[in-house]
Image: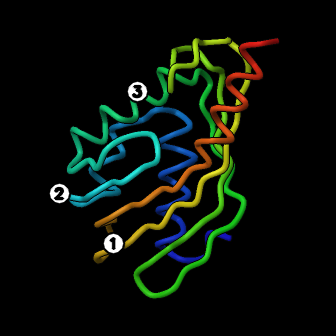
Amino acid sequence: MFDTPQKESVRVFYKEMWDHADKTLIPSLFHADFTFRGSLGPVLVGHAQFAGYVDMVTGTFGDYTSDILELVEEGPKVAGKLRFHGLHRKELFGVPPSGKHVWWHGAPIFTFDGAKIRDLWVLGDIHGLIERMRDAHAR
C-alpha cells in the first residue's frame, strides 16, 4: 500500500505523527506555508497553526489513533479513506466528555509539491462522530 514516496509520507503523517502526536515530524512532511482544511476546524496555514490543531485533537481524544483503510495516488495527489478513533476526553460540538471510545471516518486529499505536502483537505464524518459521542455519553 505504501509503495511510493508520497504514500509513505502519508503513512508517516498518520502512523508516526498523529498516532504519537509527534509534532517534530511536521517540518519534514509539510512546506512551511502549507494549508490545511479539516472538518473539525478552520483553514490553517503553516506549521505552528497545524501543531495547535494536533494538540486540540489529541487532547480531546485520548489514545488517538488512525487506521489507513485505502490510499489512491494520481500525479501529485494522494487521497485516502481512514478511520480515526480515541477516548472522548473533552467537550466537542457541545457534547460533554464521556471517557468512552468513539470513532469516525475521514477522507484526506494530500497535494504534494516536490517531496513535501503543499495542501491537505480532510473531510470527516462529523455527524457520525457527534452521534457516537452522544451515544457514548448516554451510556
Q: Nearer the viewer, mark 3 or mark 1?
A: 3
Q: Nearer the viewer, residue 113 or 104?
A: 104
Question: In what quadrant of the picture does the N terminus appear?
Answer: bottom right
Q: Amino acid at mark 3?
A: Met
Q: Which residue is mark 1?
A: 115
Point out residue 14 in the picture as x, y percentages from the top left corner. 54, 49
Mark 1 element type: loop
The residue drawn where x is 47% and y is 62% is 9
**Left or right of 46: which side holds 5?**
right
Density class for disc 2 (Cα within 10 Å; few <14, some 14-19, many ≥20) is: some
Mark 2 element type: strand
Coloration mode: rainbow
Q: Amino acid at mark 1?
A: Ala
**Left or right of 19: which side holds 118?**
left
Density class for disc 3 (Cα within 10 Å; few <14, some 14-19, many ≥20) is: few
Q: Earlier in the sequence, mark 3 or mark 1?
A: 3
Q: Earlier in the sequence, mark 2 or mark 1?
A: 2
Q: Are marks 3 and 2 in contact (CB under 8 Å)?
A: no
The residue drawn where x is 70% and y is 22% is 134
Point out residue 132 in the picture as x, y percentages from the top left corner. 73, 30
Q: Which residue is mark 2?
A: 33
Distance (Cα) linking label 3 and label 1 = 27 Å
Q: Is residue 56 above or below residue 2?
A: above
Distance (Cα) linking label 2 and label 1 = 14 Å
Residue farthest to the bottom, as pictured: 75
Q: Earlier in the sequence, mark 3 or mark 2?
A: 2
The residue drawn where x is 62% and y is 69% is 2
Q: Which residue is mark 3?
A: 56
Density class for disc 1 (Cα within 10 Å; few <14, some 14-19, many ≥20) is: some
